[in-house]
Structure formats: C-alpha cells, structure tokens
Amino acid sequence: MTTQLAPGLLVAAPGMNCPFFHDAVVLLVEHGEEGALGFVVNRPTQTPVTSLIEGLEDEDLAEHLTGEVWVGGPVAPETGWVIFDPTSGDTTEVECVTLCERVAVSASRSFLERLTEGEGPERFALLLGYAGWGPDQLDDEIRDGSWIFVDLDPALVFDVPPEHRWRTALATLGIDPSRYFSLGGVAEA
C-alpha cells in the first residue's frame, strides 16, 4: 500500500545527526502500514559498475555500463537495484515499479543482463542496498523533523549532480540549510 508520500523524495533535514543519512536524498518507493522503502540517490561510490559483473571482459559491453555503483541504503547491501528513466531507451518487458513517467525501479536480474548487452535505457543507476523503515518508523522521524518531503522530480534523480542534490532539493521548497539550526535533534527555522 502506498500513500501520498510515495512516490516522492525524502530530504534529510539540516542538522540530521544520523551519519548515514546526513545530507541524504531518498527516492521513496513505498510507504504504508507495513513500513517504507526507498533508495538514497546521492551516494555514488568510486566503484565502476563493470566491476560487479563477473566475466565482463568484452570492452564493447563494458562501455555500455558507464558510471559508478551507488549506495542505495544501509539495509541488505548485497542486493542490487536499478533506478532508470524508462523514456531513455527500450524498457519493454522489464519487471519494474514505475514511479512516474521518467523514474522506475527494478531488481530484475534479466534486466541487469540486458544492460550488460547494451540494451535498455541510457539513463540508469545501479544501487546496492536500500533504506527501509518499520511500521510507523518513518512517520515518527518525519514528525520529529528528521525528514522533509519533496515531490518527485526526475531532474533531481538524474540531472542534478549528486553532490548538489541535497541543497537543490531543499531549494525547491525555499529552504536554505545555512539558515537552520538544531534544537534537541529537531531542525528549526
């Protein structure tokens, strides 16, 4: 079950103390009675995507998989996920969750294989792990001021450089993080 929060973006409030989620932008995929699931979309690593695929020695195939692996979240870091723009190439018969016209998520192994063959969308990110919350946990964190909700904007997911996504997401709401200070863990204006 999804709510008005999903799909959307969760932006860590200025002053969030959690080391992993400090300045994070999370693509929220699901939010309901059983909890919430999302992916951090501003934590690239220095690991090339090609390093994750055993036997990828063909240079032609390797050139289709440019970019880095991203840290999608602290939960189940051994799992792989692909966030992609379905309008940027052939995504027929891809098992996925479509969040909006230009953002979808898949955990399909066959989809990853298609990507290694140079088929599929041109715009994608490979993430390891995800961000997860138990029942009511995210709601409590939002009430405590840890997260700020922003409408899903594909440009924030694909176009804005990762190091600028947090500030850019806050700016869409007119929030300047330098004007915030923390009172007991809660961000205040």
Image (cartoon, grey):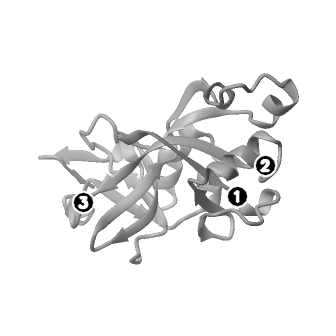
Kind of residue sitting beneath label 3: Gly
**Horizontal relation, residue 29 to residue 181: left or right:** right
> The N terminus lies in which quarter of the figure?
bottom left
Q: Quadrant of residue 36?
A: bottom left
The crowding category of the residue bearing disc 2, from other C-alpha atoms within 10 Å (few below 14, some 14 to 19, many at least 20), is some
Q: CA distance from mark 1 to mark 2?
A: 8 Å
Residue 97 percent location from the top left of the image: 57, 66
Q: CA distance from mark 2 to mark 3?
A: 34 Å
- Residue drawn at 41 percent across, 44 percent down: 24
Q: Which of 180/115 is in front?
A: 115
**Circle nearer the N terminus (3, 1):** 1
**Circle nearer the N terminus (1, 2):** 1
Q: Closer to the observer: label 3 or label 1?
A: 3
- Residue drawn at 27 percent across, 42 percent down: 15
Reading the image, the residue beneath label 1 is 85
Q: Are marks 1 and 2 in contact (CB under 8 Å)?
A: yes
- Residue furthest to the left: 184
Q: Which of 85/145 is in front?
A: 85
**Horizontal relation, residue 53 to residue 45: left or right:** right
- Residue drawn at 54 percent across, 42 percent down: 127
Reading the image, the residue beneath label 2 is 122
- Residue drawn at 49 percent across, 37 percent down: 43
On residue 159, the disc is none
**Circle nearer the N terminus (2, 3):** 2
**Horizontal relation, residue 32 to residue 8: left or right:** left
Reading the image, the residue beneath label 3 is 134
Kind of residue sitting beneath label 1: Asp
